[in-house]
Image (tube, grey):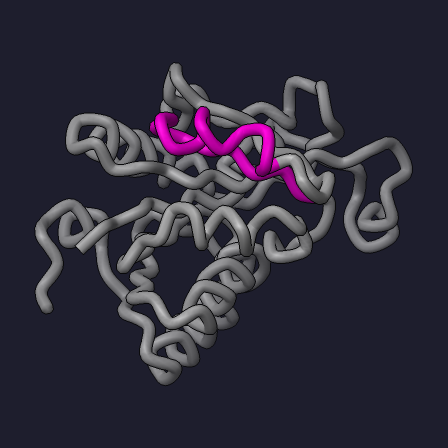
Amino acid sequence: MKTVFFDVDTQLDFLFPAGALYVPGAEDIVNTLGELTRFAAANEIQIISTADAHIENDVEFQLWKPHCVAGTAGQQKAANTLLSHSVVLGNVPGDLDAMRPRIRESSQIVLEKRAVDIFTNPNVGPLLELVNADRYVVYGVVTEICVQCAAFGLLERGARVELVSDASKALSIGEGQNVLARFEARGGIVTTAASAMKPPQL
């Protein structure tokens, strides 16, 4: 069973109190995020990471205050979630084509997005076909927004999808629990980091 870790928006603007759109308590999961990253590297598990990469005055800033503007410090991923041999895949259709050899060899692909749903990036579908994983382990921020979009989008593609509850953070505990319940009802698996780092039970 080919496993891919799917790391959602673990960026400085979300994870730490000084961030532009800080998720309260998100710093509590940073060590766990690092454990998952190190485990993936040690076991040659590819990581697909999503990352907001907004432009100035992006349309999303009508809903939330400016955050993760491309090139700013806050847009960077937390250091312990980033591997040295990562490649960045942008939002432009066809970007994947020129990068196929590098993506096959890379331990981490960072997918940029300008909306909450990673599947708005036109390269996601072709990337998932190229990666051809049987199992996705999803975690990050925010559970009821971007993590939800990633997890449910992956479920729709027929893969086994596990959502790591102690490596994800919600803005609202109630909304986060609601997402987990709906995710399980759709066939997803709610797990913990410790379980995610063991061979999956078939």
Taking the view exactly as shown, the residue that stands out farthest to the top is: 84
* Number of numbered markers: 0
Left-right relation of 44 to 161: left
Taking the view exactly as shown, the residue that stands out farthest to the right is: 57
Q: Position of residue 168 (x, y in %)?
A: 40, 51
Q: Position of residue 145 (x, y in %)?
A: 58, 60
Q: Report the front residue among 127 and 189.
A: 127
Image quadrant occupied by the C terminus: bottom left
Image position of 36 with respect to 121: above or below: above
Left-right relation of 64 to 171: right
The verdict on residue 97 being magenta is yes
User: Which image quarter: residue 33?
Assistant: top left
Which segment did they paint magenta?
A: 96-113
User: Which image quarter: residue 112?
Assistant: top right
Image position of 73 with respect to 25: above or below: above
Identity of the residue drawn at 49% across and 37% down = 10
Q: Where is residue 73 in the image (x, y as percent from the top left)?
A: 65, 18
Identity of the residue drawn at 45% across and 52% down = 128
Left-right relation of 40 to 13: left
Q: Report the front residue among 130 and 173.
A: 130
Q: Where is residue 79 in the image (x, y as percent from the top left)?
A: 43, 20
Identity of the residue drawn at 32% across and 37% down = 46
Image quadrant occupied by the N terminus: bottom left
The verdict on residue 124 being magenta is no
Q: Can residue 198 be seen in this view?
A: yes
Left-right relation of 108 to 87: left
Taking the view exactly as shown, the residue that stands out farthest to the bottom is: 185
Q: Is residue 12 visible?
A: no
